[in-house]
Image (cartoon, rainbow, N blue to C red):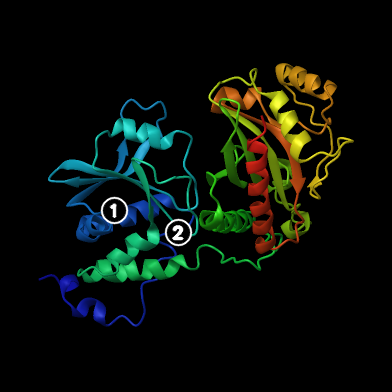
Amino acid sequence: MSSLDHPSALSGLSSSPDLRFVVPGWAENRWSDLLATLIATDPTPMGRVLGLRVDDVRREVAVAAAARKSDRLDLLLTRAGAAVAAVEVKVLSDLGVDQLTRYQAAFPNLEAYFVLHLASLPVNVQDTDPWRSLAWEDALAAYAASDHLWVNATARAWLNQLGELVPPVDADTVWNDVPDKPADFELALRARVSWLTAQMHAWSTLPHDSAQSSGGGNWAVRMWHETTSPGHFVTAEMQEGMTAYEWRYDPTRPYRERVRGPVVLVGLREDGPDTSEGFDWPLLHRMFVQHILDDTGQPADGRSWRTTSARPSDSVDKQNWLEMVESGAPRWLGQGWGMKVARSTRSSLFGARFEIPATATLGMIDTELRKTQVLLRAMASTP
């Protein structure tokens, strides 16, 4: 028996191992490496938490014929040499566009597919076949019960460290009460969005999620409802209102002084076409006339709507927007994105934005989102 396998090898430790330098929050690959080491040493706990029989693991498996050289599956679990499950590892980052679709195509017909993430920072997985969510907390708790002493001690220390990784927030947390280091600031805002998303899981009856904005850094809470127009959904997306330029670090102005507060874009989204040419501008106008505007064309619902002119940049979008304005719509209706984004994401969204104060608590913001769900349901019924 090796000295490291002897029961007394770890019994003399006065405290758990300090893993801050082994698995820092920003080093996702190190998290994958250490977890793969735990699995290779004792595959039983991972098999137990996944409900599978597993005896080994492969790390960073190249995706065959991938258009991106960086496409590598984090963990491929095996049994008797055959692949049985795919695990994509996330810590502070989110999934890439179509990432899971590419991985499933590269590793078809497995018994299971999982995305591993922090419970406090869920990624955009809707738990629909075949990909399912798996929390780091659950995986490490399984390994903390391992009979292997090193695996047990490492998992326990790792599990204890998770509580210090993401700043705790609750209903009393003020939106702009944020740290000033850029990485900590971004993580604080994401923790707020994740908390709001978790509340929505409890009360929302509409499809909803949270996702990173295309510009990076900022995170959005989203919910939507199908409408009477094919391919169109009435949608609300909430995120911090700072511009990309304002997002940059400025040592003379702390973030808490620059945060604008949440901004909610309410409008009509079209999914499917790689063009916004067929966007239903008349329906968008009718929705606002019936549910938001008064007889003079001004907001009548008490929200703080931004009333600066929309001015879409694409020539097709601009022409369609001008026709809507000429039919009586306010010029501030039509904010959002169209042709340029549709070409890459097959989605366009136009509407209007209202603001929530930066000093609002998460509880107050959650209340506003609940009211917004009621608004979306009413708007969705517009003929």
Asked if residue 63 can be seen in this view, the reply is no
Cα gap from disc 2 to disc 1, whole angstroms: 20 Å
Q: Residues within 10 Å of mark 1 (few under 14, many from 20)?
A: many
Type of amino acid under label 1: Ala
Name the spot of residue 271 as percent of width and height, x first: 56, 28
Which residue is nearer to you in this view: 336 or 24?
336
Please tell me which residue is depicted at 43% across the width and 51% down the height of the picture.
28
Give residue 268's quadrant in the image: top right
Instruction: Give 355 or 149, whichever is nearer the viewer.
Output: 355
Q: State how many labels appear.
A: 2
Q: Quarter holding the N terminus?
A: bottom left
Query: In terms of sequence position, does the residue under pointer 2 or pointer 1 come before the other?
Result: 1
- Amino acid beneath label 2: Ala
| Residue topped by disc 1 | 36
Q: Residue furthest right?
A: 296
Estimate the x, y position of residue 119 in percent, counting from the top left.
45, 59
Residue with the mark numbered 2 = 119
Q: From the viewer's side, name the closer residue of 381 and 102.
A: 381
CB within 8 Å, label 2 to label 1: no
